[in-house]
Image (tube, grey):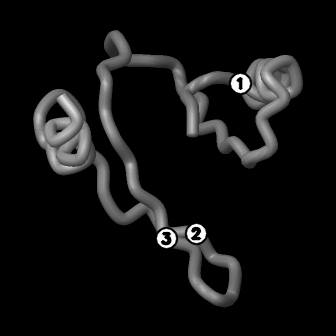
Amino acid sequence: MARAPIEEIEALRKQMDWKFPWVSFYIKPAMEDLSGDSVFFKDDAGQVFHTYSTFGRGGEQFVGPIVFLT
């Protein structure tokens, strides 16, 4: 998922030879982009649900395995 026009995303995806799909939620930014994490769920019918997002703090659970490697 990226906040960029889909044309820019697709061009980069092809350049990088990425096989996974990307989704654009392009809007005129009201503020500077911040780092964050988003989680989605796709059900058996193919519907995609946005289940969780965090920006700034709140993504520590995603780096847990890294702590054990350092």
Side of 11 where 42 appears, left or right: left
For label 3, the residue is 41
Nearer the observer, 19 or 64: 64
The tag earlier along the polypeptide, 2 or 1, is 1
Q: At numbered mark 3, what does the secondary structure look like: helix, strand or loop?
A: strand
For residue 15, what is the image quadrant? top right
Dots 2, 3 in contact, CB < 8 A: yes
Q: Quadrant of residue 26?
A: top right
Q: Residue at x 34, y 10 (%)?
A: 32
Three-letter code for the amino acid on which mark 1 is drawn: Pro
- Give the vertical position of 5 relative to 59 (above or below): above
Label 1 sits on a secondary structure element that is loop
Q: Specify the amino acid type for callout 3.
A: Phe
Mark 2 and mark 3 lie on one chain; the one further toward the N terminus is 3
Is 39 in front, or is 27?
39
Q: Are marks 1 and 3 in contact (CB under 8 Å)?
A: no
Q: Nearer the viewer, residue 17 or 49?
A: 17
* Helix, strand or loop under label 2: strand
Asked if residue 38 is positioned above or below residue 49 in the image, the reply reads above
Mark earlier in primary sequence (1, 3): 1
| Residue name at image x 65 percent, y 37 percent | 24
- Real-space Cα distance between discs 2 and 1? 20 Å
Is residue 51 shown above or below 20?
A: below
In front of the other: label 1 or label 3?
3
Residue 9: give x, y in percent of width and height. 74, 26
- Residue 22 % position (x, y): 69, 42
Q: Position of residue 58 (x, y in %)?
A: 13, 42
Residue that badge 1 annotates: 5
Residue at image location 58% in from the left, 69% down from the top: 48
